[in-house]
């Protein structure tokens, strides 16, 4: 297993929405990815375990929290 840092370069192909994995929630997944892409510009860091499961951490500078 490895740790993947999700960025604006790879967010399109990364699975990031563990709570919205149903096919019916694709619109929500797209909106979440758009929201995250904007937060990357504010310093958001999103790391996830490259494994089947829901293991991730995300943080950003306190002034943008």
Image: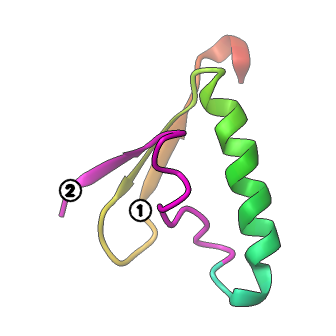
Q: Residue at x 69, y 75 (%)?
A: 20
| Residue 44 in picture, x, y percent from top left | 57, 30
The answer to whether 24 is drawn above or below residue 36 in the figure is below
| Residue 63 in picture, x, y percent from top left | 70, 11
Image check: 22 left or right of 53? Answer: right
| Residue 43 in picture, x, y percent from top left | 57, 21
Magenta stretch mostly in which secondary structure? loop
Magenta stretch encompasses residue 22: no
| Residue 15 in picture, x, y percent from top left | 50, 67
| Front position among marks 1 and 2 | 2
Name the quarter where the C terminus is drawn.
Answer: top right
Image check: 62 left or right of 53? Answer: right
Q: How are the colours assigned in the image?
A: rainbow
Q: Residue at x 63, y 81 (%)?
A: 21
The answer to whether 1 is drawn above or below residue 43 in the figure is below
Residue, disc 1:
55
Residue found at the far bottom of this picture = 23
Compare marks 1 and 2 and give the one earlier in the sequence.
Answer: 2
Magenta stretch encompasses residue 5: yes
Image check: 61 left or right of 49? Answer: right
Residue, disc 2:
2
| Span colored in magenta | 1-20
The Cα–Cα distance between marks 1 and 2, rounded to whole angstroms, is 11 Å
């Amino acid at each position: 297993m490895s740790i993947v840092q999700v960025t604006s370069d790879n967010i399109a192909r990364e699975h990031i929405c563990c709570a919205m994995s149903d096919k019916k929630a694709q619109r929500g997944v797209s909106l979440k990815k758009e929201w995250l892409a904007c937060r990357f510009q504010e310093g958001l860091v999103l790391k996830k375990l490259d494994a089947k499961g829901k293991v991730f951490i995300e943080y950003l500078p306190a002034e943008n929290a």
